[in-house]
Amino acid sequence: MLVVLTGCGQVQPVALTAAASAGQPSVQTKESVHTYTGKVEGIEEVTIYAKSSGRVAKVFRDVGDVLDAGTPLFGLEQEELAASLQMAKADLALAKSKWEEAKKGTRKEEVLYAEAGWRQAQQKYMDIKNGKRPEELTQLEAAFQSAKTSKELAAAKKERIYELYQQGAVAKQAWEDAESAYSTVDAQFLRSQEDLAMAKQGATQPTLQALEANVEQMKAMYDKAKNGATSEQIAQFAAGVEKAQAVVDNAEYQLKNATIQSPIKGYVSTKNIHAGEMISPSTQAMTVVNTEKVYVVIGVTEAELGNFAVGKEVDVAVDALGKSYRGSVERISPKADPGTDTFTVKIMIDNKDGTLRSGMTGVVSL
């Protein structure tokens, strides 16, 4: 309906609301905009620790440096670790050598040597037990007299050279040589004297027992050389090799981990160490953040949670940069935060140019 009013000579049309011909009212609505403020986080953030205690030898990277995965960050002193590795390798080589020898068996010449030692010990025992024959006593007597004469001559020579040394006629070295020669022939004399005395008197029971025990010991050594190592002994040598190898592996691991590398691609966001400092495995040395993609993390109430779904695109304004970005919902927490009673929603944004930085504020609109 159009009502025409007349006033001051002008006609003004006024529109009045009326039902449509279908009988339904016409309602005009305005779409509401919801905003949520959150913080920018790197898609990956790693706190770097050393795997063992030590002194920092060098720091290779600083805050803001761009990294690839595997880039060295800092290194600990390595001298003691390198020495430990060398010792472990030497022990491993020795263990392997013993194992290989055990598997191959005793060499022929070693078997012959062991047999000769056993035969000699057996012969000596029988000689002492049975006593010396007359001709053997004669030989021992002659050897004793010869050793006695040699001792007397050496003693006389030593005294003569000492007198010359006192007079300054010969050097001190000549007297020392004469004294050394006397000591040698004196030892030979004493052995000869003991052999002759034992041959004349015969061996005592303790002496025979000691000689017999020596024969048994030499026989055991010969049997061991002849038969070679047992399967149990070979297994023990093999276990020794495994143990030594484990020590080498551990030493190599410790040396390798003395240089700490970045586990991810990104940049250094914090650095808490300097060269010369002592650190432990509990020291937070550095933090590395990957921001090729970032999350804007917001908290959403239970009533508003239905507005979000994984994959939904939203706008994110970052006032610090004066820019807006298009992101998508990547993750929605299945449980509300007990402190705020809100659900965590993460919106992912591509950040290949690196303009977005961890810690910035983003306003999500939808």
Image (cartoon, rainbow, N blue to C red):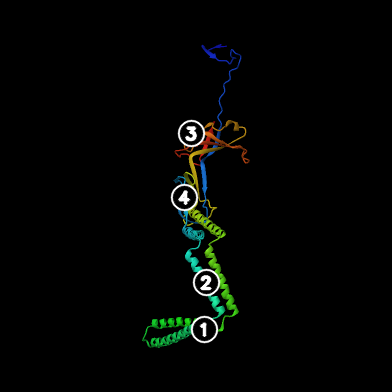
Q: Earlier in the sequence, mark 1 or mark 3?
A: 1
Residue at the limit of the structure toward the left, as seen here: 169
Kindly identify the amino acid type of the residue bearing the numbered disc 3. Answer: Ser
Q: CA distance from mark 3 to mark 2?
A: 100 Å
Q: Which mark is residue 134?
A: 1
Q: Earlier in the sequence, mark 4 or mark 3?
A: 4
Image: 349 above or below 154: above
Q: Which residue is mark 2?
A: 119
Kindly identify the amino acid type of the residue bearing the numbered disc 1. Answer: Pro
Q: Earlier in the sequence, mark 3 or mark 2?
A: 2
> Which residue corresponds to the image point at 59% horizontal and 78% vertical from the top-left?
206
Q: Which residue is mark 3?
A: 324
Q: Are marks 1 and 3 in contact (CB under 8 Å)?
A: no
Q: Earlier in the sequence, mark 2 or mark 1?
A: 2
Q: Nearer the viewer, residue 190 or 355?
A: 190
Image: 111 above or below 282: below
Q: Earlier in the sequence, mark 4 or mark 1?
A: 4
> Which residue corresponds to the image point at 56% horizontal and 75% vertical from the top-left?
211
